[in-house]
Image (cartoon, rainbow, N blue to C red):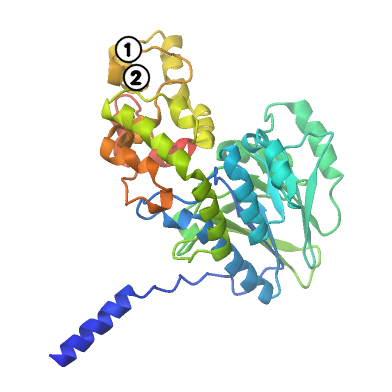
Amino acid sequence: MLALLFVGIALHLRRSSPSPPPRIELPKEPPDLLLLITANRQGKLEVCGCPGKRAEDLAKVATLIQDTANEMQRRGATVSIVEGGDFTGSDDVVPYLLKAYKVVGYQCVVLSPRDEKRLTVIQSNADGVQLLPPTNPENLQTFRIQGKTFSVVLVNLGQPPVKDENYWQRLLQHLQALKQPNTLLAVVAYIDRNTAMELAPRLKGTVDILLIDDALPLTNSEFSPGMTKASKEVSGVLLAALPQSRAAVLSLMLWANSENRDSYRLEGQWMYATGRNDNPQVKQIIDEYYAKRQEELEREMQELMKIATQKAYLPPEFCGECHQAQYEQWLSTGHARAIEVLVEQKRMDRSCLTCHSLEFRLRGVVTERKKRGVECVDCHEELQDPATAQMHGQRPGERPSARIVNAEIICVRCHDKQNSPNFNLQTYLPKVAH
């Protein structure tokens, strides 16, 4: 009996003790230059209690970045930490994000077109971190990362006019002027993978790295446990995908050839913050933000509860008052034009509106046609349930485990074989994910 009791106690202690974080899978041969790049945080400091999403917390990502940077620097690599864009949410969260970035050691913040809308508040809180706004051919702003053998010059193109030949002739001329011996040119462009594939041959010989805001199609042989390959060479240009998840960090590595100073090798991989502990300094910054935000959270809950209790229609701009980055991302999708499309095609009938209009499905009418269609509550169904809607009054990280949007079930309600015969969830989901 005593032996069984001892075994039981030992098992309990083993289960209750925190498990060590997964080992960072670093290359056997350390690179000469390493860029650690985050993106698409969209103002989120921590996530709700959804199972499996804890790694998206900023404090855990901060630990992953600092652990990786410290280890690689110990092994002789030069490390630079960069924000790749779409990091802002509402104005009130920007100072806290930039304060956390300063603690982690970010050297540069690349501004997406959506970030640039909050340029004033970003500039007033940058505190020495270099900002790289979208540029134009006549005014190329750059950020240089100096390695032991090679350096990387970073340029932000924003959302370039892909079909404008005059733009590209002028831009390539100015980019070419930045080329120097042992210098690689990396440009950030907020374009999708298909556009990047078409653009790569045009950039060949001038641009070495094209960072895009989309995932890349890879084969099964290009995946490895713990880290996912995030780069692909196309027409002599390395396409590297910015992280599409708040839990991911892009590790962009450059190896110099010791026998040939003009030769190098590039590779990009995504690393994940799963299993990391919170960075205590960053966690303190997050706590400060939510202590200030608590009163507003409770007010939002009261308004949302009224709507949920009445099973009333919740317009998207209501959610956008607080979730500004997510609302702006939604506005850029076809979902936000779902009713306008029906108007253009003269198909405002019940069979089409059932999928194209949340308001029609709830109320049987359409009162607004612009910036309406497939909306927040279509996917976030818990907002219609008073029992789950009230969680909006709690700090996200303290909410009980909530339901996750199950895209495999929700999306195919409308994107079925009859209405969307060519629908592919893996291709389309990144276009609407936020």
- Residue bearing mark 2: 359
Q: Quadrant of residue 177?
A: top right
In terms of secondary structure, where does tag 2 sit? helix
Position of the N terminus, as image quadrant, is: bottom left
| Of the pair 280 and 87, the residue shown nearer to us | 280
Hey, which quadrant is residue 266 in on the image? bottom right
Q: Residue at x 30, y 41 (%)?
A: 388
Q: Is residue 129 left or right of residue 197?
A: right
- Residue shown at 54%/49% (left/top)? 289
* Total numbered badges shown on the rendered structure: 2
Helix, strand or loop at disc 1?
loop
Rendered residue at 39%/73% (across/down): 19
Find the residue positioned furthest to the left.
1
Q: Is residue 241 visible?
A: no
Whether pointer 2 and pointer 1 mark residues with C-beta atoms closer than 8 Å, the reply is: yes
Q: Which residue is mark 1?
A: 365
Relative to 33, residue 19 above or below? below
Residue 258 in sight from this viewpoint:
yes
Pick whichever of labels 2 and 1 is earlier in the sequence: 2
